[in-house]
Image (cartoon, grey):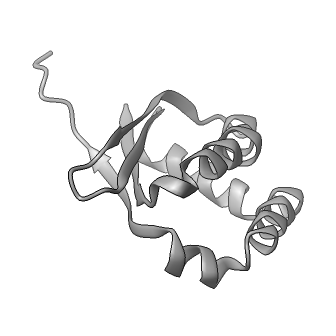
Amino acid sequence: MFFRRKYYRVKPEFVENFNVHFNQRLLPAQQKYGSRLVGRWMMDMEDGTVEIFAIWEYDNYEEYERIESLVRNDQEHVKRVKDWYEANGGKEHVWNSYFFEVRNEKITSTLMN
């Protein structure tokens, strides 16, 4: 199994909009091609930002790469995401105004088999 953690640190006033975007656009596209969402959580940080992160599961790293390629090349999905950015002032505005940090990380289990 391959697991990844997608991590965002955002302004609190953007959380609801971003969560709707995730549920309506990002999640369906990932699931369409076989990504398995373990869960998605958020928590308030001491610096006034909000951490949002999701754990995703794949059969292996190659499957993750295949799925990501399919999502990036899904023109209907790309258009929905582009339209969302445009409705929120453009991609550059969203990234500069609402996101403080974004990471896509491989995570490893510490459980012994």
Quarter in which the C terminus is drawn: top left
Q: Which sits in the foreground, 39 or 96? A: 96
**Coordinates of residue 26 in the picture (x, y in percent):** 68, 48
Q: Is residue 5 left or right of residue 99?
A: left
Quarter in which the N terminus is drawn: top left
Q: Is residue 64 above or below residue 112?
A: below
**Coordinates of residue 105 in the picture (x, y in percent):** 33, 54
Which residue sits at x=53%, y=44%? 63
Find residue 73 and report its image quarter. Answer: bottom right
Q: How many marks?
A: 0
**Coordinates of residue 18 in the picture (x, y in percent):** 61, 51
Q: Is residue 83 above or below residue 38?
A: below
Which residue sits at x=81%, y=68%? 87
Which residue sits at x=79%, y=70%? 82
Find residue 9 and report its image quarter. Answer: bottom left
Find residue 22 and report its image quarter. Answer: top right
Q: Is residue 108 above or below residue 61?
A: above
Q: Which sits in the foreground, 52 or 45? A: 45
**Coordinates of residue 11 in the picture (x, y in percent):** 45, 60
